[in-house]
Amino acid sequence: MAQGTVQVTHGGASRWRRRSGEYSTLTAALAVAGDGDVLSISPGTYRENLVLEHAVTLRGPEGGLGSVRIAPPDGVALTVRASAVVQDLHLEGQDRAAPALLVEDGAPELTDLRVSTRSAAGIEVRGSGARPLVRRCTVENPTGVGIAVLDGGGGVFEECEVVAAGQSGISVRSGGRPRLERCRIHHATGAGIGVTGEGSGLEALGCEVYEIKGAGVQIASRATARLTDCAVHRTSADGVTLDTDAVLTLAGCDIHDIPENAVDLRSRSVLTLSRTTVRRFGRNGLSVWDPGTRVDAESCEIHDSTGDYPAVWISDGAAVSLDSCRVHDVPDALFVLDRGSRVDVVDSDLSQVRNTAVSVSDGATAQLDDCRIREAATGAWFRDHGSGGTLANCTIDAVQTGVIVTKGADPTLERCTVTSPAEAGYYVSAGGRGTFTACRVTGSSGFGFHVIDGCRTTLKGCHTERCARGGYEFAEDGPAAEGCTSDEPGPRPTALPPPAGGSTGARAGRTTGAGAGAGVAQGSVPEAVPVPVPRPADPPQETDAGAAPARDSGEVLGQLDALVGLDSVKREVRALTDMIEVGRRRQRAGLKAASVRRHLVFTGSPGTGKTTVARLYGEILASLGVLERGHLVEVSRVDLVGEHIGSTAIRTQEAFERARGGVLFIDEAYALAPEDSGRDFGREAIDTLVKLMEDHRDAVVVIVAGYTAEMDRFLTVNPGVASRFSRTITFGDYGPEELLRIVEQQAEEHEYRLGEGTAEALLAYFTVLPKGPAFGNGRTARQTFESMVERHAGRVAQLSEPSTDELTLLFPADLPALPVLPASC
């Protein structure tokens, strides 16, 4: 289309001194236009770089969107520095280092624009004086950011659409603070919405983020955001992520159809949710990590998990509060673990849970008040020493087992009622403790309270009724019971003198209420043995070996030797350890020590133990005094590569600093240098890393890991890469015998045994198991064991009174069917 003409209409009588009329170029028309003038542009293609310095109106033919194209060969197509009005234009840019539309100052009105470009950004708002009002604009930028707001810029975007972006759909950084209203962001490669940096913020109302190859919404590095009545769905990574002191409020939002975590928080981030729904997620609905990280949710719903992970995961000292919430149709509802981690739940419903509604372990705490748990395998399970909390005024209905307390856990339960459990109402074993006050069990198909192994449990004012096997089943010299009753005829808990230094309450002997089966053995196993639930795979994280008393190198090497297989890996690590140890001794003797490069390359398939060995290697180096802490910081491309020039170096430096004194483990490191990288920012991460390894060679050990062929290519991308790493350690695939050994270890850990012929059947199974793309070595072995446990549970659940052997033995019939691979595999 040929270039047209530009008609200038002056805005007042005082304009007589200026020339008026038609101009052949926009540049010429703008040269004579002043505040209030209107520039009407005829259809055509204008290959000019336009700069608006005055409050003019620049418009194409009404209703003729696309008929006026501003398409310069390079540079910024349109720069706005005044409160101008721009409408009905089509902007195109070709400069990878500049935006197509740049707003630097003023409060311009930009309406009905289409930005189709291959630029650094489609629309960029830069500077504290830039406050545009952008209405019904469409941005398509398959090579860069859709809309960028930075350096204190702001503005309002109404009914705008980012239809494609090669990086983030909307990127806010360096103090930018825009407002989005009824906008749509989709088909971006990177975050749909990304807000990062102290002072940066975003408010979104009625917006939709979907079809994103990355995270839907990403808030990081002290940024803040508020989303109201927004939807995030169909992402390839997490739906919403918060990291490093980020603050986010979600009100009336819907997060759904997410293959990974629906919402993931870490590093002291804070999330507030109200009236928000989280549904159809592949991993955790809420994944909350690290001390200081917190979630406060009110009137929210989390449901319909599509994976095998807990709906709410709380660990490493994080805290979650749920008020008037519903969690249902999930494998597990709440998993809280690690000392300092805490969940507080008030007036909430947990229902249709395939495994455990509330699981508390590793010293964590759970506080539930006025909650309702229904249709679960286990209502609440306090798993081990230091784990506890309080359940008060809670009802647990239609479960296999109401509450389980094991391995030294010590919760407090007050005025809780378990109704119609298929097995025990309350079950305590393996050194579990617990205080039960005014608790009730009604209509149990097993015992009401079942306490074995001499557990020091305290019961006060508890009551049972209609329990098929009896109200109370106690081991001798175990629980202390005071004022406990049952509506069934027969013996009640017997009061015995307390032992020296013991409880002032009465101690119960082995007792059952009426209806207890005859000949029940003292110290019998529980009617329902909980099925082990796989802990979700850890996302990139930092583990601090210094948090626990440091182990000596011999102990850590012993743990390394105990790993299944990996013989060549063990030899390599021991050789490195011996070199370092002898070097230390030579230095103490006043001799020169050979220089040992400690950075390593790990190659091999997934599930071969690379991360585990990296963690042990760090601990070994710390025990030898080579590293200060020996902790592991695990990262991947997404943690190192930024969205714009300069941000990658910052991210890489931050990861390196977190690893100072320990090990920086870069998984799938070859992704930093894709074969078709072009100007990919991953090369910047590699260059930054190489320099940091040289400048701080004694502060951090770097381990890069990935598939063998890809890592060979990675080592050639930068002349300094190969020279920084001392050696490559190859992790071979596990053979059938080693996979069998992993299953045997899993069975021993979870108190199962392999029945006659099962080991042979497993060996044959692993021999013929297809090694397709989904094969995960050790992970596959663990998944096989978990499948066997599920099939075993389905079989044993049909037995009225299974024996100990029936509860623990796994047979060949419990093996899962072999997967069928596509012909192309």
Image: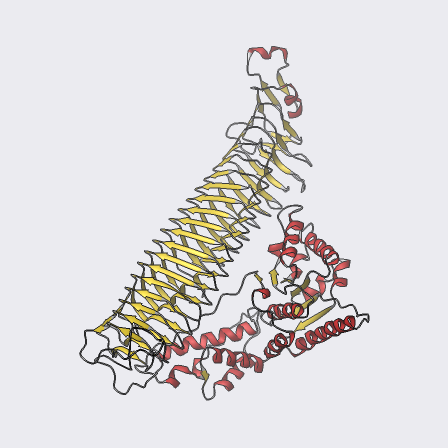
Q: Position of residue 293 (x, y in %)?
A: 49, 54
Q: How is the image coloured?
A: secondary structure
Q: Position of residue 139 (x, y in %)?
A: 55, 40
| Position above or below: 277 against 101 | below
* Quarter of the image where one finds residue 197: top right
How many labels sit on residues? 0
Considering depth in this image, is 3 or 666 the residue closer to the camera? 666
Look at the picture and state if 480 lies above or below 266. Answer: below
Question: Is 493 positioned to the left or the right of 746 in the image?
Answer: left
Q: Is residue 45 visible?
A: yes
> Can you say whether 243 is above or below 396 in the image?
above
Which quadrant would residue 333 be assigned to in this image?
A: bottom left
With 441 as the anchor, is 637 left or right in this view?
A: right
Between 635 and 494, the residue placed more toward the observer is 494
Which quadrant is home to the C terminus? bottom right
Q: Nearer the viewer, residue 34 or 699?
A: 699
For residue 677, say whether it is visible: no
Q: What percent of the width, then of the height, locates residue 714?
A: 70, 61
Residue at x-position 43% and y-position 77%: 789
478, 602: nearer the viewer: 478
